[in-house]
Image: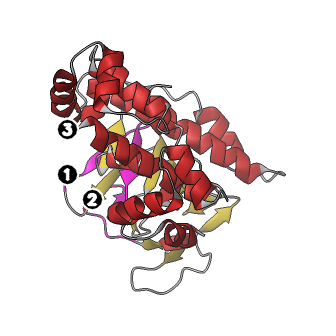
Amino acid sequence: MDVLTGLLEGPRARGAFMIRACFDPPWAVRVEDRAPLTVMLLVRGDAWIVPDGGEALRLRPGDLAVARGPDPYTCADAPGTAPQALILPGGECHYPDGRPLNGVMDLGVRTWGDRPDGGTVMLIGTYRMRGEIGGRLLDALPPLLSLTSDVWDCPLLPFLMREIVREAPGQEVVLDRLLDLLVIAALRAWFDRPEAEPPAWYAALSDPVVGPAVRLLQDDPAHPWTVAGLAAKAGVSRAALARRFTRLVGEPPMAYLTGWRLALAADRLRDTDDTIGALARQVGYGSAFALSTAFKRAYGVSPQEWRSGAA
């Protein structure tokens, strides 16, 4: 497994908030849901994503935008349009003055806005919890990124358009998996752009020395790795590997391994019922106490508190 594959295995939507938004200009929606990741795929019309800080982003048909929370932003037909609705955590919809919309803009199955055949149509999928994405993947992304239709083609669009308005047994799971596929396809395309500025670990994968070392750590985090052991596998001296790894990845090999082990533990605490001791062994710690100490140092809470917060 390469590092990118390991990271992109993270998206696991569970009951994601997915809608087909349909509007006639002028329109604007203020998003303050604090969601860790939202994907917006424009089907028809024009749209702008306007973050509170940074430049506004224009979308045309076929373009996709990914917003990394929790910072708020506005979706609109034009940057200056005043919001007519406010999206809060949990998918609650209010007027800008705080009054609940109470279904005023509901247009049918997962369809929301002015009218079903509005001039602007956008598919929106939102992950509600950070653990559904994986911290290392989120940390590798800018607050707002986009892929234009001329640099990527979304083969999922016809299927998404058909499935998002269906009511059928298991439909929620179908849409969750489609959202995961859309995110993986989009982020893989984004990381591979020539003009992209990928994170250091991604660029380091192509290095003939550091790339294999990163993959070794990624593939077997439970192994009792040492810098000397990694260097022997890479065919270089301990000092050479440590120096090169730190320069390309931005942190020493053992620091990278610690971060990867704890990220795996954090995700598995949300996704499994395994004991802390079992998780410790899976990610390379000798005991539940050792994992708990390192976890609390990095995340500020104990593994059990992390698991309880996720529940």
Relative to 160, residue 247 above or below: above
Please tell me how many numbered marks the rendered image carries. 3
Q: Residue 167, percent across and down?
A: 79, 54
Residue at the spot of label 3: 250
At label 2, the amino acid type is Pro
Q: Residue 49, percent across and down?
A: 33, 53
Q: Residue 136, percent across and down?
A: 38, 46
Secondary structure of residue under mark 2: strand
At label 1, the amino acid type is Glu
Q: Nearest the camera: 241 or 128?
A: 241
Q: Residue at x 44, y 58 (%)?
A: 290
Sort mark 1 into few (<14), some (14-19) or many (20+) by Cα contacts within 10 Å.
Answer: few
Taken as a whole, is the magenta stretch helix, strand or loop? Answer: loop
Residue at the spot of label 1: 55
Residue 118 in magenta stretch: no
| 2 or 3: tag closer to the N-terminus | 2
Q: Nearest the camera: 13 or 121?
A: 13
Residue 58 in magenta stretch: yes
Q: Quadrant of residue 150?
A: top left
- Is the residue under label 3 in contact with that under label 1 (CB below 8 Å)? no
Residue at the spot of label 2: 51
Q: CA distance from mark 2 to mark 3?
A: 29 Å
